[in-house]
Amino acid sequence: MVKQLRLGSGLVLFAYVATHFLNHALGLVSLPAAEGGRDVFLFVWRSWIGTAVLYGSFAIHIALAFWAIFVRRTLRMHRWEWIQLLMGLMIP
């Protein structure tokens, strides 16, 4: 259940970032293309459903990261685990 929540919330966050960067890429094509992409982006993510899903996914993803730290018996981790944890916490 936890893995499914983490995967689902991560995919929603990835979709948000991907559409955000896609909108920036449209700006390389032309300004009208970027404005059209912005309208689609805002329609999806600024609706009440999109906002609730985005913020809910963000909260779930962060909570699960802290839960993974909390349930550990020790903070002895490999270097890559520390890097992954610190980079994930630096994003916000």
Image: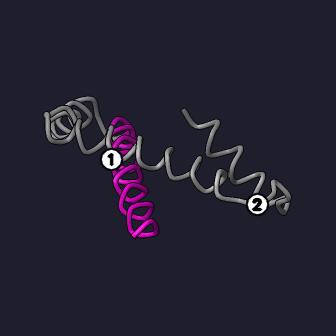
Q: Is residue 43 left or right of residue 13?
A: left
Asked whether 61 or 91 is in front, the reply is 61
Asked whether 69 or 8 is in front, the reply is 69
Q: Residue at x 14, y 41 (%)?
A: 49
Asked whether 12 or 82 is in front, the reply is 82
Mark 1 is on which residue type? Thr
Q: Residue at x 82, y 60 (%)?
A: 77
Q: Residue at x 20, y 41 (%)?
A: 50
The image quadrant that residue 1 belongs to is: bottom left
Asked whether 91 or 57 is in front, the reply is 57
Q: Is residue 68 left or right of residue 25?
A: right
Name the residue beneath numbered marker 1.
19
Q: Is residue 81 left or right of residue 23?
A: right
Name the residue beneath numbered marker 2.
73
- Taking the magenta stretch, the answer to whether it contains residue 9 is yes
The CA distance from mark 2 to mark 1 is 39 Å
**78 lies above or below 67:** below
N-term-proximal mark, 2 vs 1:
1
From the top left corner, tell me how far across and down residue 57 is, in percent: 36, 47
- Taking the magenta stretch, the answer to whether it contains residue 20 is yes
Q: Is residue 7 left or right of residue 88?
A: left
Q: Quadrant of the C terminus?
A: top right
Callout 1 crowding tier (Cα within 10 Å): few <14, some 14–19, many ≥20:
some
- Range covered by the magenta-colored residues: 1-28
